[in-house]
């Protein structure tokens, strides 16, 4: 597999479209950090890291609106790809859906959202947009 982050996002996207409650993914450190950011921002209900096997897995409980059954995540879009990396400086942070969504960045201080990166005055690689 050449792009594990794109695979992670695609598996989440497919589980949301199929109205699954839980999705299980192969784990890596960057995927764990992205999962933590998604949980902090309220896009997923809960997550659990299982390190019993060699690679480990991530179980993610997806979040849906109780009345309308609409998913919390409407769109997951991969931005920086292995063939074309996209970086953003502090002054040119991307605005997702005019500030309603979040851009997840990989910075020198860890994986964080665009707003947190702006507060910490760091730039980095734009991994994905979530809204």
Image (spheres, grey):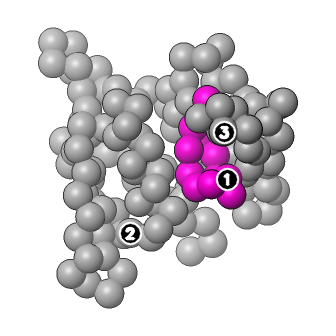
Instruction: Tell me the distance, in whole angstroms, between the alpha carbons under discs 2 and 3.
Output: 27 Å
Residue drawn at x 79%, y 62% is: 83
Give the SS element for disc 3: helix
Q: Residue furthest front?
A: 120
Q: Does the magenta stretch include residue 1?
A: no
**Above-or-below relation of 51 to 84:** below
Give the SS element for disc 2: loop
> In the picture provided, is 96 more to the left or to the right than 14?
right
Residue drawn at x 76%, y 44% is: 123
Label 2: few (<14), some (14–19) or many (≥20) C-alpha neighbours in 10 Å: some
Instruction: Tell me the distance, in whole angstroms, between the alpha carbons under discs 3 and 1.
Output: 10 Å
- Disc 2, disc 1: CB below 8 Å? no
Label 1: few (<14), some (14–19) or many (≥20) C-alpha neighbours in 10 Å: some
- Disc 3, disc 1: CB below 8 Å? yes
**Above-or-below relation of 4 to 47:** below
Please name the residue that numbered disc 1 is placed on. 107
Give the SS element for disc 1: strand
Q: Is residue 107 magenta?
A: yes
Instruction: Tell me the distance, in whole angstroms, between the alpha carbons under discs 2 and 1.
Output: 20 Å
Please name the residue that numbered disc 2 is placed on. 27
Q: Nearer the viewer, residue 107 or 2?
A: 107
Q: Give the range drawn in magenta.
A: 103-115
Q: Which mark is residue 24?
A: none
Q: Nearer the viewer, residue 23 or 106?
A: 106
- From this viewpoint, is residue 124 visible? yes
Residue 67 image point, x, y percent: 15, 12
Q: Which of marks 2 and 3 is nearer the N terminus?
A: 2
Please name the residue that numbered disc 3 is placed on. 120
Q: Nearer the viewer, residue 54 or 41?
A: 41
Residue 35 image point, x, y percent: 40, 50
Tell me which corner region of the image, top left, top right, bottom left or bottom right, holds residue 121: top right
């Amino acid at each position: 597999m050449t792009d594990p982050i794109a695979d992670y996002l695609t598996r989440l996207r497919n589980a949301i479209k199929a109205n699954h409650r839980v999705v299980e993914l192969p784990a890596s450190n960057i995927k764990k950090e992205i999962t933590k950011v998604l949980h902090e921002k309220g896009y997923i209900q809960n997550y659990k890291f299982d390190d019993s096997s060699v690679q480990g897995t991530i179980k993610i409980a997806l979040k849906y609106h109780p009345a309308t059954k609409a998913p919390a995540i409407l769109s997951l879009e991969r931005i920086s790809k292995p063939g074309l990396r996209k970086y953003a400086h502090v002054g040119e942070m991307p605005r997702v859906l005019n500030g309603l969504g979040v851009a997840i960045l990989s910075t020198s201080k860890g994986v964080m959202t665009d707003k947190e990166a702006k507060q910490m005055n760091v730039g980095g690689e734009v991994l994905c947009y979530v809204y």
